[in-house]
Image (cartoon, helix red, strand yellow):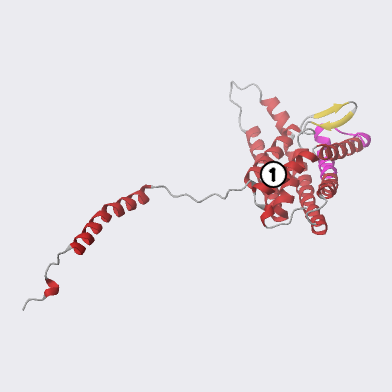
């Protein structure tokens, strides 16, 4: 007897099934080949945090180089980074207010590591033998040779000052909530900037030629007042940037606005 199950089946239904099976085979093969040839990447979160971290560290490195020059403006002693370094505290405020203390601390320590690496690179570049046709070795060593001391000053002042700035801003925020942003910005700046300026000036003074107590006190006071004044002047911009970042990052989706 013949087993009907083993006989080839025909009919409209079976023909359609065979056609579908045949039509899908090349498509599935094409998808598999495409997946095999498409490079894989780790997805990058859409956040502004990396951009602010990069700007923050860039400001830090440039400031520590320009600070090697002592300048005097209207009889007031300061260094060549006076016009740029306050921006690091503005960015630090944005990071602390929008992303919190832990994220800001991560940025601060990343900047610390990169700046320490820059110091080692400067030292190595000075020690490397100059080419016969290179005529600026002495000038190169004079300018960057003071950087290690200034970097040490910058590292010490910056780490303590920025961490205090971030910590105090978040401590005030715990009390005020989303209200009184101006109080958080000013309170944290006064704490962070004063400690930063005092530590930096104490270590960096001799590197830029300050050798009297009067000039040193002038250096500390002018630096502190200037940086705090810059924070006050640019506060409307800081407000606008913080509001923009919070909107872009969906902050108000989970927080009650002030």
Q: Which residue is mark 1?
A: 244
**Magenta stretch, overall SS:** helix
Which quarter of the rendering shows the N terminus? bottom left
Camera-nearest residue between 249 and 145: 249
Q: Residue furthest right?
A: 214
Q: In the drawing, does residue 92 fall left or right of residue 132?
A: right
Q: In the picture, residue 20 is in which quadrant?
A: bottom left
Q: Residue at x 85, y 38 (%)?
A: 229
Q: Quadrant of residue 235?
A: top right
Label 1 Cα neighbours within 10 Å, binned few <14 / some 14-19 / many ≥20: few
3 up-or-down from 8: above or below: below
Residue farthest toward the left in the current orientation of the protein: 1
Q: Position of residue 25 (x, y in %)?
A: 26, 55
Q: Is residue 50 left or right of residue 22?
A: right
Q: Is residue 39 magenta?
A: no
Q: Is residue 210 magenta?
A: yes
Residue 10: give x, y in percent of width and height. 14, 64
Q: Residue furthest front?
A: 12
Q: Against 109, is 149 above or below?
A: above
Q: Secondary structure at mark 1?
A: helix
- Residue at the spot 14% in from the left edge and 74% down from the top edge: 5
Front-most of 74 and 140?
74
Picture mark count: 1
Q: x, y percentage for residue 55?
A: 67, 40
The residue lying toward the viewer, choosing from 18 and 30, is 18
Horizontal placement of 32 versus 80: left or right?
A: left
Image location (x, y in percent) of residue 147? 73, 36
| Left or right: residue 29 compared with residue 113 | left
Q: Which residue is drawn at the image coordinates 87% and 31% (left, top)?
A: 77
Region in magenta: 196-215
């Amino acid at each position: 007897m013949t087993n009907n199950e083993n006989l080839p089946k025909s009919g409209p239904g079976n023909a359609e099934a065979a056609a579908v099976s045949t039509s899908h085979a090349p498509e599935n093969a094409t998808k598999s080949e495409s997946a095999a040839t498409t490079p894989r990447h780790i997805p990058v979160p859409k956040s502004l945090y990396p951009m602010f971290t990069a700007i923050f560290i860039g400001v830090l490195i440039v400031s520590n180089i320009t600070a090697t020059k002592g300048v005097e403006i209207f009889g007031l002693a300061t260094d060549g980074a006076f016009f740029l370094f306050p921006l690091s505290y503005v960015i630090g405020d944005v990071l602390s207010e929008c992303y919190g203390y832990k994220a800001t601390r991560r940025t601060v320590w990343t900047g610390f590591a990169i700046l320490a690496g820059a110091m080692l690179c400067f030292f190595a570049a000075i020690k490397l033998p100059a080419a016969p046709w290179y005529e600026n070795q002495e000038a190169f060593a004079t300018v960057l040779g003071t950087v290690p001391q200034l970097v040490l000053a910058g590292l010490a002042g910056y780490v303590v000052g920025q961490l205090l700035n971030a910590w105090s801003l978040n401590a005030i925020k715990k009390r005020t909530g989303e209200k009184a942003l101006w109080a958080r910005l000013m309170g944290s700046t006064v704490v962070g900037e004063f400690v930063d300026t005092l530590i930096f000036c104490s270590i960096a003074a001799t590197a830029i030629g300050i050798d009297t107590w009067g000039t040193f006190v002038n250096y500390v006071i002018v630096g502190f007042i200037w940086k705090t004044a810059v924070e006050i002047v640019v506060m409307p911009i800081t407000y606008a940037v913080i509001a923009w970042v919070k909107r872009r990052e969906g902050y108000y989706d989970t927080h009650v606005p002030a």
